[in-house]
Amino acid sequence: MNLRRKSILLCDEKNMRQKRVILLLFNLVFLAWGLHGQTERKFFVSSAVSTRERAAIYFMAAQQEMSVKDAESFYLRAYEEYKRALQEDSPAQARTFIYLRLAECSQKLNLPVEQADYLNKALETSEELLESESKIYTLAVLSVASQCVEAHDYSQAYTLLKKVRENARKDNISECLWLAVMSQIEFDSGRFRRAVNLRRRVVRKSESAYKQNNTAETQKLYVDALQDMASLGGNYAACYYKKAYDEYVRVVYSELNKKTEVSRSRYWGGISSFFNEVFDRAAEMPAQAYDAALLTKGLLLNSSIDFQNYVANSGDSTAVRLQKERNLLIQEGAPVAVVDSLDNLIIARFNGADNPFKEESIIHWRDVRRELNEDDLAIEFYTSGEGKYGALLLKKDWRGPLNVEVEPDLTVWNRHLRRYFPKTEKGRVFFSPAGALNLRAIEYLPCEIRGLESKCMAEVYRMYRLSSTRELVLQRKEKERKGIVIMGGSDYSADYDKILKVSDSLNTSRRIDREYEAVMDNLHGHNPEHLPWSAREAHTVDSLMSSYGYNVDLFTGKYASEEAVSGYAGKGGLLHVATHGYYVSADETQEKNYYVRLYELNPELMLDPLSRSGLQFAGAEHVWDDDEDSVTPGHNDGILTAREIALMDLSKVEMVVLSSCESGQGDLSGDGVYGLPRAFKKAGAGTILMSLNPIYEGNYLPFLMNRFYQNQLLGKDRQTAFLEAIQAIRAKPEWNIPEIWQAFILLDALPGD
């Protein structure tokens, strides 16, 4: 069966419905073969000894990658690994699977001749399964037929469909797939009514199969059938999309209960494309899009937090012990495989018990509307699968959300959006950014109202930046305000022997390095790398909070160490850190000696973006910049990475203040920003004050922080207190420059906090 003559067609522009059919087919072939999902578990449990398993990981990474360039890179890696896998002795079933994967990789890499060859080989190999594994054979042929449809080779596709028609009738899944491919042929041929009727049959049959046998396979078949039906357009599209959305949410919550943290991440990468399509249709279905934003923003982060809390409160001493061992292993740099194995043991403890992720706990847009006051405005920004930005708006008296298109630049607060802003001083604006907006202080953009051009948006409106507007619904537990922990003026060049000696005697909560501070004062700021202002800032905040009766734990100089932070950070209601912060992109790690050495010791850390942002403390110079091997990168090396912070217990901390450069930066992903804010949130912290840019050194920092805390002590909520602190900065001409007063943003500070 020669497909080479049709190879040139394989490069044609793809139709979205065709993509969905082929994705459905591939996923179900892998489900039927028991390879989809099992592959990822094997990889993380048995440390990826198989070439085919490595290839599968690269392939899944390519599917979830938003960047075309990066996706192509992953497809190329998968392509090479699958070619190597062919050299291994594999049964016909596995070889058919590999040939199909190679065909898809070839198509993604614009290699039409190779794709045709691999499709031929997939068909030839699948013939060996005709007698023993007829279902697998049928699915393989349908997969090839679908690719033929994608290449507009309808004659070949029709021939293949005829070949397996009788076999397809024997099995619900196979018949649904057969009907789906046929409906695509009808649709592309202009026979719209026949295409719709065929898709309706797919919906009915898949729903019947799902009700008779509720498995992940039949559930996915039904959801994809609904989505395919909706993709045909027409008056019924929104109805089918709503059904698909509701069912997808059930799928997500059902799957989260069965998966480890690693496999949840892989799973989400595979199914997030559906929610991207919901955002693509936000104008048609704003209510579902708003709900999707509430569900998906920080889904992986929140599911991880929820599961940790579930274990901690379960009363299962074995599970709690395993959880502690797991966190300790991560801290020590244990392989992902080992950590994932422990996660599986913890999950096994709760088989048959109440699930930590329940559908009834899902927050909807109506719940958010209930929390709004008159004239309040809630905004959920989103990015669509097409890369466009939008804003979903909600007010107290509205029947449902409203969609507004925006651009992620200086015009984000466009006139279409501003027309719904509060008209009174009582009105508040709660906004949750998405995509690149997470890394921009959009609340400080100029106000374009006539006569108010000199003010920023936050000065004109009461604006609250939130991780998600679901924060308005969640009931925060009142945390005990036991005091404040302050770290500042770290001695980055401190000798490690001294740090170890003082660490052994950290039995008092006030360790001030007077000797080091005196040296810094004598330098009069001539060594800015050692941040002389950070010690002054620490003492300023200490004096203020102590005068109001707060119990203050203060650490400076060689005492402001990574170990001190780890030991004391979670003991106060407030954590204030004045030190170097950093974020390093994946490309930049090759130029940093610290990361070159760290990745040599533990290559798996290269895959964890939380390892590339952090805070520097006493002794950090020796391991950050120097080439000396006397200090090994890792735990207690003076560099506290976001990965390490995420393992701390900060559940008692109401607010974290990061007076550090780029402390709000990180890798952008569909689950938010992977950096310090995510780490502190995962550790249990509430509000976070952070910087998106480098911080200008100067006396304005002690002044700003002093005024911020002073305003709070006078009874003002955090957002109001910080805004007034910024206005006090702007009132001084020498400090009224954007690089200074726009340096910090406040996340998840709710009214009344």
Image (tube, rainbow, N blue to C red):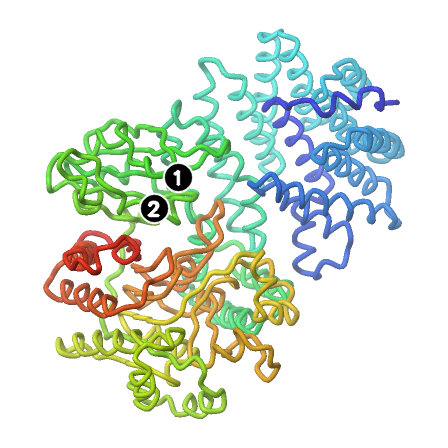
Decide: is 575 above or below 98. below
Percent position of residue 444, x then y: 26, 47
Decide: is 298 above or below 615. above
Secondary element at image label 2: loop
For disc 2, the neighbor class at 10 Å (few under 14, some 14 to 19, many from 20) is many
Percent position of residue 441, x then y: 32, 49
Secondary element at image label 1: helix
Asked if marks 1 and 2 touch (Cβ < 8 Å), the reply is: yes
At label 2, the amino acid type is Ser
Percent position of residue 352, x then y: 52, 54
Q: Would you name the residue on which mark 2 appears?
A: 468
Residue 753 visible, this angle: no
Residue 302 visible, this angle: yes
Decide: is 546 above or below 193. below
Q: Residue at x 37, y 57 (%)?
A: 693
Q: Tell me, for residue 293, which label it has, or none.
A: 1
Percent position of residue 96, x then y: 82, 37
Of callouts 1 and 2, the N-terminal one: 1
Q: Determine whether, in the image, residue 15 is placed left or right of residue 281.
A: right
At label 1, the amino acid type is Ala
Q: Based on the displayed image, in which of its 4 quarters is residue 176 positioned?
A: top right
* The one of 3 and 517 positioned closer to us in this rendering: 517
* The one of 218 and 684 positioned closer to us in this rendering: 684
Q: Determine whether, in the image, residue 91 is placed left or right of residue 671.
A: right
Q: Determine whether, in the image, residue 531 is placed left or right of residue 594.
A: left
How far apart marks 1 and 2 lie (CA) works out to 8 Å
Q: Tell me, for residue 504, which label it has, or none.
A: none
Q: Residue at x 31, y 60 (%)?
A: 688
Q: Determine whether, in the image, residue 500 is placed left or right of residue 741.
A: right
Quadrant where the image shows the N terminus? top right
Quadrant where the image shows the C terminus? bottom left
